[in-house]
């Protein structure tokens, strides 16, 4: 199982291979070579006298165990893992690949302020859009209501209460129209009287309010 070296993705991009995979490959090759040499060494005692073979095999077993402990503990843990993987093949935090260096920028306080202003502007636009959508929906509802009332009036399905309201509205419009006509007539009279006053050299000029009252509402 490959050793899990923390944060080795950047090293993988730089070297072209994962440091943990490199560690596993080297360890497997060294173990294979050592095992092959020990196997060859064990073949030779078979040619020695049987009385010596037991002691030799016992010694070879001890050598095999000790070499394995030294190989795994000292070489791969202290030398290979800590020094090679942890120091030599470990890129510093300040190191950047060329592809990343092109995009590395430091934002100034002015950039941050501009960005915050743009964000606030977008928020205000969003609020305005929501407000306008609400107003538009209300207007559409009002249009639908008026359209429905017009259709009811055209089809003769308007109720008695609605007809009373319509009659009241007509009377109010007639009354307002009459007052508007009187007001227009009064304004014209005021203009005529004012023009006459300006043309005369009378010392005591009548008040404009008196003229308006006398001439307009006889």
Image (cartoon, rainbow, N blue to C red):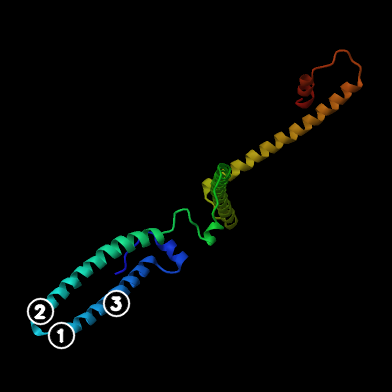
Q: Would you identify the image quadrant in which residue 85 lies? A: bottom left
Badge 1 density bin: few <14, some 14–19, many ≥20, Cα 10 Å: few
**Could you tell me how far apart the alpha carbons at marks 2 and 3 are, in whole angstroms?**
25 Å
- Classify residue 48 as left or right of residue 113: left
Checking the image for residue 63, the label placed there is: none
Q: Which quarter of the figure is the C terminus placed in?
A: top right
Residues 32 and 164: in front is 32
Residue 164 visible in the snapshot: no
Quick one: label 2 or label 3, which is nearer the N terminus?
A: 3
Question: What residue did someone put label 2 on?
Answer: 54
Task: Calculate the distance from the C-alpha at mark 1 to the C-alpha at mark 2.
Answer: 10 Å
The Cα atoms of the two marked residues, 3 and 1, are separated by: 22 Å
Q: Percent position (x, y) of residue 192? A: 85, 28
Q: Using the image as rendered, state which of residue 41 and residue 129 is in the foreground.
A: 41
Identify the mark at residue 33; answer none if there is no mark: 3
Where is residue 55, by image quadrant?
bottom left
Left or right side of 173 for 43: left
Looking at the image, residue 215 sits to the left or right of residue 28; the answer is right
Q: Which residue is mark 1?
A: 46
Q: Quadrant of residue 174?
A: top right
Q: Is residue 211 or residue 11 the one in the foreground?
A: 11
**Badge 3 local density, few (<14 within 10 Å), some, or many (20+)?**
few
Report x, y in % for residue 88: 40, 60
Image side of residue 72 versus residue 131, left or right: left
Q: Earlier in the sequence, mark 3 or mark 1?
A: 3
**Mark 1 or 2, nearer chain start:** 1
């Amino acid at each position: 199982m490959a050793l899990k070296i923390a944060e080795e993705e950047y090293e993988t991009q730089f070297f072209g291979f994962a440091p943990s995979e490199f560690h596993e490959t080297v360890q497997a090759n060294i173990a294979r070579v050592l095992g092959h040499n020990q196997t060859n060494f064990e073949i030779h005692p078979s040619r020695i006298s049987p009385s010596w073979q037991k002691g030799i095999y016992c010694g070879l077993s001890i050598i095999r165990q000790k070499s394995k402990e030294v190989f795994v503990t000292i070489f791969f843990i202290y030398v290979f893992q800590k020094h090679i993987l942890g120091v030599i093949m470990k890129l510093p935090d300040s190191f950047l690949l060329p592809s990343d260096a092109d995009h590395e920028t430091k934002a100034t306080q002015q950039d941050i302020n501009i960005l915050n202003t743009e964000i606030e502007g977008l928020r205000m636009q969003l609020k305005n859009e929501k407000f306008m959508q609400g107003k538009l929906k209300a207007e559409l509802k009002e249009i639908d209501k008026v359209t429905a009332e017009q259709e009811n009036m055209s089809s003769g399905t308007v109720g008695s209460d609605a007809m009373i309201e319509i009659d009241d509205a007509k009377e109010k419009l007639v009354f307002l129209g009459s007052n508007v006509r009187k007001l227009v007539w009064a304004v014209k009279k005021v203009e005529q009287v004012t023009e006459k006053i300006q043309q005369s050299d009378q010392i005591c000029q009548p008040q404009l309010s008196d003229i308006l009252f006398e001439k307009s509402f006889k």
